[in-house]
Image (tube, rainbow, N blue to C red):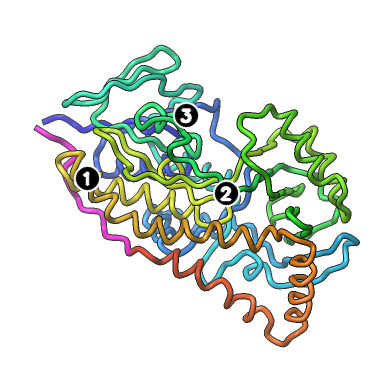
Protein backbone atom coordinates (compact mmCIF):
# COMPACT_ATOMS: atom_id res chain seq x y z
CA UNK A 1 0.00 0.00 0.00
CA UNK A 2 1.30 3.49 -0.90
CA UNK A 3 0.12 6.88 0.27
CA UNK A 4 -1.48 8.96 -2.45
CA UNK A 5 0.24 12.22 -3.35
CA UNK A 6 -0.98 15.58 -4.63
CA UNK A 7 0.68 18.76 -5.81
CA UNK A 8 -1.38 21.94 -5.47
CA UNK A 9 -0.23 24.94 -7.50
CA UNK A 10 -1.19 28.15 -5.70
CA UNK A 11 -1.31 29.07 -2.01
CA UNK A 12 -4.49 31.08 -2.31
CA UNK A 13 -7.85 30.37 -0.70
CA UNK A 14 -8.78 27.49 -3.01
CA UNK A 15 -5.35 25.86 -2.89
CA UNK A 16 -4.93 26.03 0.88
CA UNK A 17 -8.48 24.79 1.50
CA UNK A 18 -7.90 21.84 -0.80
CA UNK A 19 -4.52 21.09 0.82
CA UNK A 20 -6.04 21.17 4.30
CA UNK A 21 -8.77 18.68 3.44
CA UNK A 22 -6.47 16.38 1.46
CA UNK A 23 -4.18 16.20 4.48
CA UNK A 24 -7.18 15.43 6.69
CA UNK A 25 -8.00 12.56 4.34
CA UNK A 26 -4.47 11.19 4.59
CA UNK A 27 -2.94 12.42 1.36
CA UNK A 28 0.69 13.53 1.19
CA UNK A 29 0.19 17.06 -0.15
CA UNK A 30 2.62 19.72 -1.36
CA UNK A 31 1.70 23.32 -2.21
CA UNK A 32 3.88 25.38 -4.54
CA UNK A 33 3.47 29.16 -4.68
CA UNK A 34 5.12 31.67 -7.02
CA UNK A 35 5.17 34.52 -4.49
CA UNK A 36 7.93 34.72 -1.91
CA UNK A 37 5.68 34.55 1.15
CA UNK A 38 2.01 34.31 2.14
CA UNK A 39 0.22 37.26 0.60
CA UNK A 40 -1.11 39.97 2.87
CA UNK A 41 -3.54 42.81 2.33
CA UNK A 42 -6.03 42.61 -0.49
CA UNK A 43 -9.65 43.58 -0.72
CA UNK A 44 -12.24 42.66 1.87
CA UNK A 45 -14.09 39.47 0.98
CA UNK A 46 -17.37 37.84 1.95
CA UNK A 47 -18.01 34.31 3.20
CA UNK A 48 -21.61 33.25 2.66
CA UNK A 49 -23.90 30.26 2.54
CA UNK A 50 -22.24 26.90 1.98
CA UNK A 51 -18.78 28.43 2.39
CA UNK A 52 -19.58 29.18 6.04
CA UNK A 53 -20.06 25.45 6.50
CA UNK A 54 -16.59 24.78 5.10
CA UNK A 55 -14.75 27.17 7.44
CA UNK A 56 -16.86 25.92 10.34
CA UNK A 57 -15.79 22.33 9.63
CA UNK A 58 -12.21 23.54 9.54
CA UNK A 59 -12.64 25.01 13.00
CA UNK A 60 -11.92 28.52 11.73
CA UNK A 61 -15.29 30.20 12.09
CA UNK A 62 -14.78 31.46 15.68
CA UNK A 63 -11.46 33.08 14.68
CA UNK A 64 -12.99 34.55 11.54
CA UNK A 65 -15.77 36.10 13.63
CA UNK A 66 -13.16 37.94 15.71
CA UNK A 67 -11.44 39.27 12.56
CA UNK A 68 -14.46 40.62 10.71
CA UNK A 69 -14.13 43.99 9.02
CA UNK A 70 -17.04 45.31 11.10
CA UNK A 71 -17.94 47.80 8.38
CA UNK A 72 -21.06 49.37 9.84
CA UNK A 73 -22.16 51.93 7.27
CA UNK A 74 -22.10 52.59 3.55
CA UNK A 75 -22.82 55.73 1.57
CA UNK A 76 -23.01 56.89 -2.04
CA UNK A 77 -21.81 60.41 -2.86
CA UNK A 78 -21.90 62.69 -5.87
CA UNK A 79 -19.04 64.69 -7.39
CA UNK A 80 -19.34 67.38 -4.73
CA UNK A 81 -19.24 64.86 -1.91
CA UNK A 82 -22.93 65.15 -1.01
CA UNK A 83 -24.36 61.94 0.42
CA UNK A 84 -27.07 60.71 -1.91
CA UNK A 85 -27.88 57.56 0.06
CA UNK A 86 -26.75 55.85 3.26
CA UNK A 87 -27.41 52.36 4.61
CA UNK A 88 -26.12 49.81 7.08
CA UNK A 89 -22.80 48.13 6.34
CA UNK A 90 -24.27 44.63 5.95
CA UNK A 91 -26.89 45.85 3.49
CA UNK A 92 -24.27 47.85 1.58
CA UNK A 93 -22.03 44.75 1.40
CA UNK A 94 -24.81 42.33 0.49
CA UNK A 95 -24.66 40.36 3.73
CA UNK A 96 -27.51 38.73 5.61
CA UNK A 97 -27.78 36.62 8.75
CA UNK A 98 -24.58 34.69 9.49
CA UNK A 99 -22.67 36.03 6.45
CA UNK A 100 -19.32 37.50 7.39
CA UNK A 101 -16.68 39.74 5.84
CA UNK A 102 -12.93 39.52 6.40
CA UNK A 103 -9.80 40.92 4.77
CA UNK A 104 -8.37 38.49 2.22
CA UNK A 105 -4.93 38.58 3.81
CA UNK A 106 -6.38 37.67 7.20
CA UNK A 107 -8.20 34.65 5.78
CA UNK A 108 -5.07 33.54 3.93
CA UNK A 109 -3.06 33.72 7.14
CA UNK A 110 -5.59 31.54 8.95
CA UNK A 111 -5.61 29.00 6.12
CA UNK A 112 -1.81 28.96 5.90
CA UNK A 113 -1.52 28.30 9.63
CA UNK A 114 -4.18 25.59 9.49
CA UNK A 115 -3.28 23.74 6.28
CA UNK A 116 -0.37 21.90 7.90
CA UNK A 117 1.29 20.91 4.61
CA UNK A 118 4.62 21.46 2.89
CA UNK A 119 4.33 24.87 1.19
CA UNK A 120 7.18 25.86 -1.15
CA UNK A 121 7.32 29.58 -1.87
CA UNK A 122 9.22 31.36 -4.67
CA UNK A 123 8.67 28.44 -7.03
CA UNK A 124 6.19 27.35 -9.69
CA UNK A 125 5.42 24.54 -12.09
CA UNK A 126 7.46 24.87 -15.29
CA UNK A 127 6.48 21.64 -17.07
CA UNK A 128 4.07 18.70 -16.70
CA UNK A 129 4.37 15.22 -18.19
CA UNK A 130 1.50 12.81 -17.56
CA UNK A 131 1.38 9.04 -17.98
CA UNK A 132 -0.86 6.25 -16.73
CA UNK A 133 0.83 6.15 -13.34
CA UNK A 134 1.22 9.80 -12.40
CA UNK A 135 2.44 13.28 -13.28
CA UNK A 136 6.12 14.18 -13.56
CA UNK A 137 6.67 17.83 -12.67
CA UNK A 138 9.61 20.09 -13.32
CA UNK A 139 9.67 23.27 -11.24
CA UNK A 140 11.06 26.68 -12.14
CA UNK A 141 13.67 26.17 -9.41
CA UNK A 142 15.00 23.09 -11.23
CA UNK A 143 13.55 20.63 -8.73
CA UNK A 144 11.48 17.72 -9.96
CA UNK A 145 8.76 15.59 -8.43
CA UNK A 146 6.17 12.98 -9.23
CA UNK A 147 2.57 13.01 -8.00
CA UNK A 148 -0.63 11.04 -8.35
CA UNK A 149 -2.56 14.22 -9.17
CA UNK A 150 -1.77 17.88 -9.79
CA UNK A 151 -4.33 20.62 -9.11
CA UNK A 152 -4.12 24.14 -10.48
CA UNK A 153 -5.35 26.62 -7.89
CA UNK A 154 -3.30 29.47 -9.30
CA UNK A 155 -5.98 31.98 -10.16
CA UNK A 156 -7.45 33.72 -13.19
CA UNK A 157 -4.18 33.63 -15.13
CA UNK A 158 -3.37 30.05 -14.13
CA UNK A 159 -0.05 28.75 -15.45
CA UNK A 160 -1.18 25.20 -14.62
CA UNK A 161 -4.24 25.62 -16.84
CA UNK A 162 -2.07 26.96 -19.65
CA UNK A 163 0.35 24.01 -19.42
CA UNK A 164 -2.29 21.27 -19.19
CA UNK A 165 -5.32 22.70 -21.00
CA UNK A 166 -4.03 25.24 -23.51
CA UNK A 167 -3.83 29.02 -24.07
CA UNK A 168 -5.55 31.41 -21.69
CA UNK A 169 -7.78 32.96 -24.34
CA UNK A 170 -9.66 29.66 -24.71
CA UNK A 171 -11.01 29.99 -21.19
CA UNK A 172 -10.78 33.56 -19.90
CA UNK A 173 -13.71 35.77 -20.93
CA UNK A 174 -13.22 39.50 -20.28
CA UNK A 175 -16.33 41.29 -19.05
CA UNK A 176 -15.47 44.72 -20.45
CA UNK A 177 -14.23 46.28 -17.21
CA UNK A 178 -11.03 46.83 -15.25
CA UNK A 179 -10.55 46.61 -11.49
CA UNK A 180 -7.87 48.30 -9.42
CA UNK A 181 -7.30 48.05 -5.65
CA UNK A 182 -4.64 49.51 -3.34
CA UNK A 183 -4.09 50.98 0.10
CA UNK A 184 -4.50 54.73 0.66
CA UNK A 185 -4.21 57.12 3.61
CA UNK A 186 -7.52 57.65 5.39
CA UNK A 187 -7.99 61.33 4.60
CA UNK A 188 -11.77 61.07 5.10
CA UNK A 189 -11.58 60.05 8.74
CA UNK A 190 -13.65 56.93 8.12
CA UNK A 191 -14.80 54.76 11.01
CA UNK A 192 -15.71 51.28 9.73
CA UNK A 193 -17.40 52.86 6.75
CA UNK A 194 -17.43 52.55 2.95
CA UNK A 195 -18.09 55.46 0.60
CA UNK A 196 -18.78 55.06 -3.13
CA UNK A 197 -18.63 57.64 -5.93
CA UNK A 198 -20.35 56.88 -9.25
CA UNK A 199 -19.78 58.52 -12.65
CA UNK A 200 -20.66 57.37 -16.18
CA UNK A 201 -18.62 54.27 -16.96
CA UNK A 202 -16.62 54.34 -13.75
CA UNK A 203 -16.95 53.90 -10.00
CA UNK A 204 -14.54 54.66 -7.18
CA UNK A 205 -14.87 53.70 -3.54
CA UNK A 206 -12.86 53.84 -0.35
CA UNK A 207 -13.35 52.04 2.95
CA UNK A 208 -11.73 51.49 6.30
CA UNK A 209 -12.25 48.36 8.39
CA UNK A 210 -12.08 47.79 12.14
CA UNK A 211 -8.50 46.50 11.97
CA UNK A 212 -6.98 49.04 9.59
CA UNK A 213 -4.80 52.04 10.36
CA UNK A 214 -5.36 53.28 6.80
CA UNK A 215 -7.96 52.77 4.11
CA UNK A 216 -8.38 50.87 0.84
CA UNK A 217 -9.47 52.30 -2.50
CA UNK A 218 -11.09 50.38 -5.32
CA UNK A 219 -11.80 51.48 -8.89
CA UNK A 220 -14.10 49.76 -11.41
CA UNK A 221 -14.33 51.13 -14.92
CA UNK A 222 -15.29 50.19 -18.44
CA UNK A 223 -12.53 49.28 -20.85
CA UNK A 224 -11.53 46.76 -23.48
CA UNK A 225 -8.94 44.13 -22.45
CA UNK A 226 -5.57 45.87 -22.55
CA UNK A 227 -3.37 42.77 -22.60
CA UNK A 228 -0.19 42.70 -20.59
CA UNK A 229 0.65 46.17 -19.26
CA UNK A 230 3.44 47.46 -17.10
CA UNK A 231 2.50 48.81 -13.69
CA UNK A 232 3.38 52.27 -14.97
CA UNK A 233 0.98 51.89 -17.90
CA UNK A 234 -1.74 50.62 -15.57
CA UNK A 235 -1.36 53.66 -13.31
CA UNK A 236 -1.44 55.93 -16.35
CA UNK A 237 -4.65 54.35 -17.66
CA UNK A 238 -6.24 54.69 -14.22
CA UNK A 239 -5.29 58.38 -13.98
CA UNK A 240 -6.52 59.15 -17.49
CA UNK A 241 -9.86 57.41 -16.90
CA UNK A 242 -10.63 59.42 -13.76
CA UNK A 243 -8.92 62.67 -14.77
CA UNK A 244 -12.10 64.77 -14.75
CA UNK A 245 -13.71 63.37 -11.61
CA UNK A 246 -14.43 65.22 -8.42
CA UNK A 247 -15.04 64.25 -4.80
CA UNK A 248 -11.82 62.75 -3.30
CA UNK A 249 -10.86 60.91 -6.49
CA UNK A 250 -7.76 63.06 -7.23
CA UNK A 251 -6.35 62.33 -3.76
CA UNK A 252 -7.06 58.61 -4.15
CA UNK A 253 -5.29 58.59 -7.52
CA UNK A 254 -2.24 60.37 -6.11
CA UNK A 255 -1.72 57.51 -3.64
CA UNK A 256 -1.34 54.99 -6.48
CA UNK A 257 2.24 56.00 -7.25
CA UNK A 258 3.59 54.78 -3.92
CA UNK A 259 1.16 51.94 -3.20
CA UNK A 260 3.19 48.73 -2.63
CA UNK A 261 0.05 46.56 -2.97
CA UNK A 262 -1.17 48.10 -6.25
CA UNK A 263 -3.39 45.54 -8.03
CA UNK A 264 -4.79 46.04 -11.51
CA UNK A 265 -6.45 43.55 -13.85
CA UNK A 266 -9.14 43.04 -16.45
CA UNK A 267 -12.33 41.82 -14.84
CA UNK A 268 -13.05 38.41 -16.32
CA UNK A 269 -14.61 35.00 -15.83
CA UNK A 270 -13.25 31.54 -16.62
CA UNK A 271 -15.44 29.10 -18.53
CA UNK A 272 -14.18 25.58 -19.30
CA UNK A 273 -16.06 22.55 -20.60
CA UNK A 274 -13.93 20.33 -18.37
CA UNK A 275 -12.05 21.06 -15.16
CA UNK A 276 -9.73 18.09 -15.54
CA UNK A 277 -7.53 16.50 -18.15
CA UNK A 278 -5.90 13.21 -17.23
CA UNK A 279 -4.46 13.57 -13.74
CA UNK A 280 -4.54 17.40 -13.70
CA UNK A 281 -7.56 19.32 -12.36
CA UNK A 282 -8.51 22.94 -11.67
CA UNK A 283 -10.12 24.51 -8.61
CA UNK A 284 -11.26 28.04 -7.75
CA UNK A 285 -10.56 30.92 -10.11
CA UNK A 286 -8.27 28.77 -12.26
CA UNK A 287 -11.24 26.66 -13.30
CA UNK A 288 -14.30 28.84 -12.84
CA UNK A 289 -13.59 32.44 -11.83
CA UNK A 290 -16.85 34.30 -11.31
CA UNK A 291 -15.14 37.74 -11.08
CA UNK A 292 -14.95 40.08 -8.11
CA UNK A 293 -18.29 41.57 -9.16
CA UNK A 294 -20.06 38.33 -8.24
CA UNK A 295 -19.14 38.66 -4.56
CA UNK A 296 -18.78 34.88 -4.55
CA UNK A 297 -15.19 34.17 -5.58
CA UNK A 298 -14.10 33.35 -2.04
CA UNK A 299 -17.08 31.09 -1.44
CA UNK A 300 -16.47 29.21 -4.71
CA UNK A 301 -12.84 28.70 -3.71
CA UNK A 302 -13.70 27.38 -0.24
CA UNK A 303 -16.47 25.08 -1.42
CA UNK A 304 -14.51 23.91 -4.48
CA UNK A 305 -11.51 22.92 -2.38
CA UNK A 306 -13.71 21.05 0.07
CA UNK A 307 -15.69 19.16 -2.57
CA UNK A 308 -12.65 18.20 -4.66
CA UNK A 309 -10.81 16.84 -1.62
CA UNK A 310 -13.86 14.87 -0.57
CA UNK A 311 -14.23 13.24 -3.97
CA UNK A 312 -10.53 12.40 -4.19
CA UNK A 313 -10.76 10.77 -0.76
CA UNK A 314 -13.89 8.82 -1.63
CA UNK A 315 -12.66 7.37 -4.95
CA UNK A 316 -9.80 4.98 -5.66
CA UNK A 317 -9.05 6.53 -9.05
CA UNK A 318 -8.71 10.14 -10.15
CA UNK A 319 -11.13 9.90 -13.10
CA UNK A 320 -14.07 8.99 -10.88
CA UNK A 321 -13.12 11.68 -8.37
CA UNK A 322 -12.81 14.43 -10.97
CA UNK A 323 -16.09 13.47 -12.64
CA UNK A 324 -17.96 13.53 -9.33
CA UNK A 325 -16.36 16.84 -8.41
CA UNK A 326 -17.58 18.43 -11.62
CA UNK A 327 -21.09 17.03 -11.28
CA UNK A 328 -21.36 18.36 -7.72
CA UNK A 329 -19.81 21.77 -8.36
CA UNK A 330 -20.88 22.82 -11.85
CA UNK A 331 -24.51 23.79 -11.04
CA UNK A 332 -23.23 25.79 -8.05
CA UNK A 333 -20.59 27.50 -10.18
CA UNK A 334 -23.00 28.36 -12.97
CA UNK A 335 -25.55 30.07 -10.74
CA UNK A 336 -22.80 32.08 -9.05
CA UNK A 337 -21.13 33.08 -12.31
CA UNK A 338 -24.42 34.57 -13.48
CA UNK A 339 -24.18 37.11 -10.65
CA UNK A 340 -21.05 38.76 -12.06
CA UNK A 341 -22.39 40.47 -15.23
CA UNK A 342 -25.62 41.52 -13.52
CA UNK A 343 -23.83 42.97 -10.49
CA UNK A 344 -21.19 44.91 -12.43
CA UNK A 345 -23.88 46.62 -14.50
CA UNK A 346 -25.34 47.92 -11.24
CA UNK A 347 -21.94 48.93 -9.92
CA UNK A 348 -20.77 50.75 -13.06
CA UNK A 349 -23.50 52.79 -14.76
CA UNK A 350 -22.89 53.53 -18.42
CA UNK A 351 -24.50 56.92 -19.05
CA UNK A 352 -25.01 60.25 -17.31
CA UNK A 353 -28.76 59.67 -17.43
CA UNK A 354 -28.40 56.29 -15.69
CA UNK A 355 -26.25 57.84 -12.99
CA UNK A 356 -28.70 60.69 -12.47
CA UNK A 357 -31.76 58.41 -12.30
CA UNK A 358 -30.01 55.94 -9.99
CA UNK A 359 -28.91 58.67 -7.60
CA UNK A 360 -32.43 60.08 -7.52
CA UNK A 361 -33.97 56.66 -6.83
CA UNK A 362 -31.43 55.82 -4.11
CA UNK A 363 -32.07 59.18 -2.48
CA UNK A 364 -35.82 58.59 -2.44
CA UNK A 365 -35.55 55.04 -1.09
CA UNK A 366 -33.05 56.17 1.53
CA UNK A 367 -35.66 58.50 3.04
CA UNK A 368 -38.32 55.79 3.37
CA UNK A 369 -38.92 54.01 6.70
CA UNK A 370 -37.29 50.57 6.70
CA UNK A 371 -35.14 51.43 3.68
CA UNK A 372 -32.47 48.88 4.66
CA UNK A 373 -35.07 46.12 4.19
CA UNK A 374 -35.91 47.48 0.75
CA UNK A 375 -32.25 47.52 -0.25
CA UNK A 376 -31.74 44.02 1.19
CA UNK A 377 -34.57 42.58 -0.94
CA UNK A 378 -32.52 43.34 -4.04
CA UNK A 379 -29.76 41.07 -2.72
CA UNK A 380 -31.84 37.88 -2.68
CA UNK A 381 -30.15 36.42 -5.82
CA UNK A 382 -26.75 36.48 -4.08
CA UNK A 383 -28.06 34.44 -1.16
CA UNK A 384 -29.88 31.95 -3.36
CA UNK A 385 -26.62 31.41 -5.23
CA UNK A 386 -24.56 31.13 -2.05
CA UNK A 387 -26.73 28.29 -0.77
CA UNK A 388 -27.16 26.48 -4.10
CA UNK A 389 -25.16 23.46 -2.95
CA UNK A 390 -25.43 21.14 0.04
CA UNK A 391 -22.19 19.99 1.62
CA UNK A 392 -21.83 16.26 2.17
CA UNK A 393 -19.89 15.00 5.15
CA UNK A 394 -16.43 13.91 4.06
CA UNK A 395 -16.00 10.13 4.33
CA UNK A 396 -13.21 8.52 6.33
CA UNK A 397 -11.74 6.88 3.23
CA UNK A 398 -8.25 5.36 3.10
CA UNK A 399 -5.66 7.53 1.36
CA UNK A 400 -3.62 4.59 0.08
CA UNK A 401 -3.79 2.44 -3.00
CA UNK A 402 -2.30 -0.96 -3.66
> Which residue extends farthest right?
80
Q: Nearer the viewer, mark 2 or mark 3?
A: 2
Q: Which residue is mark 2?
A: 175
Of residues 220 and 97, the one nearer the viewer is: 220
Magenta residues span 390-402
Q: Earlier in the sequence, mark 2 or mark 3?
A: 3
Quarter of the image that includes the N terminus:
top left
Q: Residue 33: which disc? A: 3
Residue 164: percent from the left, percent from the top? 35, 29
Query: Alpha carbon of mark 2 to alpha carbon of mark 3: how far?
Result: 27 Å
Residue 402: image quadrant is: top left
Q: Residues within 10 Å of mark 1 (few under 14, many from 20)?
A: some
Q: Is 393 rendered above or below residue 279?
A: below
Q: Earlier in the sequence, mark 3 or mark 1?
A: 3
Residue 97: percent from the left, percent from the top? 52, 72
Residue 99: percent from the left, percent from the top? 52, 65
Q: Main secondary structure of the magenta part?
A: loop
Amino acid sequence: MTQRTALVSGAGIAGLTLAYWLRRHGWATTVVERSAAPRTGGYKIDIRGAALGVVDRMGLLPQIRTMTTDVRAGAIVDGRGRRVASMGGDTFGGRQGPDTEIRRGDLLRLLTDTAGVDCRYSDAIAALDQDDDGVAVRFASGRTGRYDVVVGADGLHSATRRLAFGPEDRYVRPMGYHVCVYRVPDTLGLDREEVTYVAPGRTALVYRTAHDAGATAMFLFEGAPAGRMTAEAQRRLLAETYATDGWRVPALLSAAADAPDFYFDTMAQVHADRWSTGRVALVGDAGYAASSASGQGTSLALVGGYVLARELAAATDHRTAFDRYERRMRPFVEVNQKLGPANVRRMVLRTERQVRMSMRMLGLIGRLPGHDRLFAAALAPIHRAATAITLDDAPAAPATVS
